[in-house]
Image (cartoon, grey):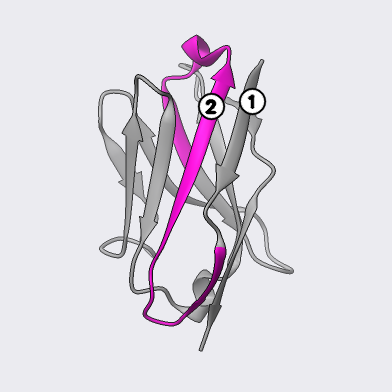
Amino acid sequence: QVQLVESGGGLVQAGGSLRLSCAASGRTSSIIAMGWYRQAPGKEREFVARIRWSGDTTYADSVKGRFTISREKVRTMVYLQMNTLKPEDTAVYYCTGQDPAGRHVNWGQGTQVTVSS
């Protein structure tokens, strides 16, 4: 099984930046991509960004141009650099890994990001 641990959340003012980190351990050989999702109070979990080990990235329209996902494949780490944060970015951010079939192998415990106006 794969274990995922996020870090780096916190409270920031609108326009500020945060960097989230996610460390994967365990059966990481089953992962070909890692990504971030978020869930705001009263809303469903939504996709934020994904990076494949090939380096290909995908972003939600709402974060394009503001967020950047990157990874260290050797260490099985993934990062989410979040710039120009908005109050609507407030959510719990979850890290996930995906296998070649696109299935989520596991989820992290989540890290809270709060953006004040």
Q: CA distance from mark 1 to mark 2?
A: 6 Å
The residue nearer to you, when weighing 39 against 115, is 115
The residue nearer to you, when weighing 86 against 102, is 86
Quarter of the image that includes the N terminus = top right
Going from N to C along the chain, the mark reached first, 1 or 2, is: 1
Q: Amino acid at mark 1?
A: Gln
Provide residue 28's location: percent of width, then percent of height: 51, 15
Residue that carries the numbered disc 1 in the rendered image? 3
Residue range (magenta): 10-35
Q: Residue furthest bottom?
A: 117
At x 60% / y 32%, what residue is drawn?
4
Q: Is residue 38 magenta?
A: no
Residue that carries the numbered disc 2 in the rendered image? 24
The residue nearer to you, when weighing 10 against 48, is 10
In this view, 109 is above or below 42: above
At x 25% / y 63%, what residue is drawn?
65
| Element carrying mark 2 | strand
Q: Amino acid at mark 2?
A: Ala
Provide residue 91's location: percent of width, then percent of height: 61, 65
